[in-house]
Image (tube, rainbow, N blue to C red):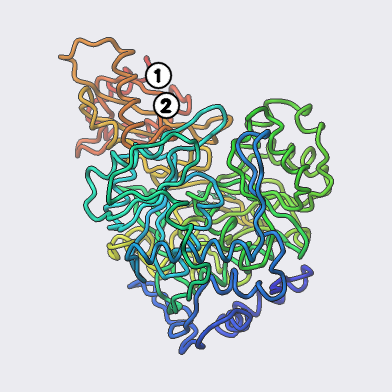
Amino acid sequence: MDLRIKTFEEYEHAYNASIADPEAFWSSIAEKFVWYKKWDTVLDWNFEEPRVKWFEGGKLNITENMLDRYLVDQPDKIAFHWEPNDPEGTNQSITYKELYHEVCKTANALRSLGVKKGDRVCLYMPMRLEAIISIIACARIGAVHSIVFAGFSSAALSDRINDAQAKVVLTSDGLNRGTKQVDLKSMVDEALESCDTVESVIVLNCIDSSPNMVEGRDYDFNELIQDMDNECEPEPMDSEDLLFILYTSGSTGKPKGVVHTCGGYMLFTAYSFQNVFQYQDDDVFWCTADIGWITGHSYIVYGPLLSGATSIVFEGVPTYPDAGRFWQVCEKYKVNQFYTAPTAIRALMGFGLDYVNKYDLSALKVIGSVGEPINEEAWRWYYDHIGKSKCPVVDTWWQTETGGIMLSGLGNLSPMKATYAGYPLPGIQPVLLNGEGEEIKENNEEGYLCMKFPWPSILRTSYGDHERCKNTYFSNYEGYYFTGDGAKRDENGMYRIIGRVDDVINVSGHRFGTAEIEDAINTNEFAIESAVVGFPHDVKGQGIYAYVVVDNDLKNGTEEIIASLSESVIDGIGRIARPDKIQIVSGLPKTRSGKIMRRILRKIAEGERTNFGDTSTLLDPSVVEQIIQNAL
Ligand code: WTA
């Protein structure tokens, strides 16, 4: 199924057509997919409620478009090459036909456990083919998957299971990550102590650890599926039925479940995949993200399979056994399109070029970046040394909520400018707003990045809390979707993302709300009050700086307290959210009305020591002095 634009002129033409008549534009793309019944209406929307419906009344099953349709023309084409954590380990390859049968067996297994259309299934799994098979198996039977990154703690897992009211959890005994083995099953057991909706747990054996299995609840993955039929009738779904929930952090409260639906997400992930990466039939694509993040959902699973592509699933990490691992894998599979995060590039830059130059990267055609702004130095290194100054860098800006890539170059078709994400994809209508909510028409001015028209894979709601969805994304600027990012546009219409303008911090491409980290800190017995901000970090993009007021009556050593605070974050969220710096303070700078002045804390974390602007509203200015004296 070819959805590719082939020249920049064609892009301009498609873009204009998509603005002039979005319904006609997206219908002509929808026609290329397999539907059991055509839709009644193309688009029904209103950003005030908000309500967005694409292709309502259309009946389909997304997996029919990922697997069944390819059984005719390319059953023996490789869908995935799986590369294990250990380079000495045995890699696996799976064809479209084999994948189809494995998915059917797993789907039948889920049905045998009573999973029906609309039920939620939680996945807490390593980067194994079985994880991908399980995701697709859910979609096959209309179950709603909710993947939780296997680096989150058991507390974070149980929050997500409870919010989604999941019926089944798929997990493994453990996982391999570099030199480490992580025990996942006991994390699940711990999480389930406070979850009462889960009826069954399916456990994949990955590390031969013979985990504790609860009789009547826990099933071995392979034993369960081995006798299942390898054909499974797909569940007919409405275009607007739920496909999945994915939890992501916002500026306030607990992470929220971003909801995506079947039809629109299908169209946009396939369309953006083919166009941004300019994927061609015999290419090998590699997205290094984890399936626990939206990038893994859209560009490991859905976009590539909908396009009939061959891609890589990688279990390991960029620096194990050494910093050449990515490039070794690129050489081994002759990767044509490589897609990773700036944090990985910055980390690998530090190890020098010997690790790069050992490998043949000549198959590369397009190299991509995602998750955070890419700084000029990292961009140059990536372009010069990985792309050998001949591969375009596609700097793809998008979000969990947008479902797919919104701003980016399209392979080698578009002009490119370091640190600029570039142009909007067809169908995407970005605007920059000023503080008054007015559209900024001038070039090179910073504004709030918003969208004024729906695209097919925009989030539909926050699971179980539509009001929250409205307040988070559709209330700041009436009639617009607000991204939470600041951006500017140059004289050629290219966009540059500045970064988040809300209380979300982006650490190595992982999103955390400052409130969420503070909540975890505040569960600690020593903590009275805390404030968390981000600060610039050479490798991670942003680091986490926590200011904590502790109980003075407790006579513990500072180091011990700091370690304990750190542990609370690891327990509450996961190791990935552990603060880089924790400063014990006697008080936080507050206004007379009791609001914490984060602006000041952010500046101190950035290294500012003198210039804090207007501090006249501070209740007690001496607090700031004290914080500065001990700043880390
Ligand atoms: C940031 C990841 C600059 C941005 C797909 C956004 C980026 C947040 C880029 C979403 C990029 C993502 N340049 N910033 N190319 N890509 N971001 O939901 O702040 O994990 O709002 O989705 O990451 O993160 P999320």
Q: Nearer the viewer, residue 243 or 436?
A: 243
Q: Horizontal and vertical percent for residue 155?
A: 30, 40
Circle 2 SS class: helix
- Rate crowding at label 2 as few (under 14), some (14 to 19) or many (20 or more) other CA atoms within 10 Å: many
- Rate crowding at label 1 as few (under 14), some (14 to 19) or many (20 or more) other CA atoms within 10 Å: some
**Image quarter (top left, top right, bottom left or bottom right) of the N terminus:** bottom right
In the picture as drawn, the residue positioned furthest to the left comes out as 553
Q: Horizontal and vertical percent for residue 436?
A: 41, 60
Q: Horizontal and vertical percent for residue 65?
A: 58, 73
What amino acid is at disc 2? Ile
**What residue appears at the point 51 percent right and 50 percent down from the top-left corner?**
291
- Mark 2 to mark 1: distance in Å? 7 Å
The disc placed on residue 604 is: 2
The disc, 2 or 1, on the residue closer to the chain's N-terminal end is 2
Q: Nearer the viewer, residue 572 or 431?
A: 572
According to the picture, the residue beneath numbered tag 1 turns out to be: 631
**What residue appears at the point 69 percent right and 68 percent down from the top-left corner?**
75
Q: Can I make out residue 491 in this image?
A: no
**Image quarter (top left, top right, bottom left or bottom right) of the C terminus:** top left
Q: Is residue 159 above or below residue 273?
A: above
Circle 1 SS class: loop
Count the numbered circles shown: 2
- Cβ–Cβ under 8 Å for marks 2 and 1: yes
What amino acid is at disc 1? Ala
